[in-house]
Amino acid sequence: MSMSMPIIRIISNACITRYNRGERDIGDIVASYTALGAEDRELVCAEIFTKRPDLMPVVEGSA
């Protein structure tokens, strides 16, 4: 069962804060939350990229 959206927002804000403080890239930070299932991880990433589109990974050949 996936986590509630308030929890997803809390985790996404925590990931953004950790990134802003100089920790690894955002994918590594999200992956460090081992309690997240695949569905929750996708929701956290979507929330992060909605708030901070500059953190979205650039896919080569898509430009």
Image: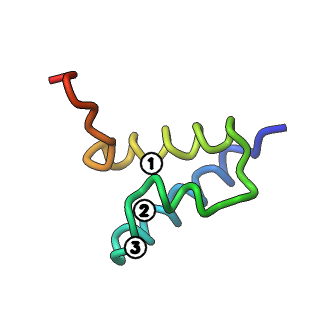
Position of 50 compared to 3: left or right? left
Image quarter hosting the N terminus: top right
Question: Residue at point 22% right, 30% down?
Answer: 60
Residue 30: image location, x then y, percent? 54, 56
Whether pointer 3 and pointer 2 mark residues with C-beta atoms closer than 8 Å, the reply is no
Circle 1/circle 2 CB separation < 8 Å: yes
Q: Position of residue 11 (x, y in %)?
A: 60, 59
Q: Of the residues shown, which amino acid type is indicated by label 2?
A: Ile
User: Residue 2, located in which quarter of the rendered image?
Assistant: top right
Location of mark 1 (residue): 48
Asked whether, in this view, residue 40 is left or right of residue 54, the answer is right
Identity of the residue furthest to the right in this view: 1
The residue at which mark 2 appears reads as 16
Q: Pointer 3: what residue?
A: 23
**Compared with residue 5, is residue 17 higher up or lower down, i.e. above or below?**
below
Q: Secondary structure at mark 3?
A: loop
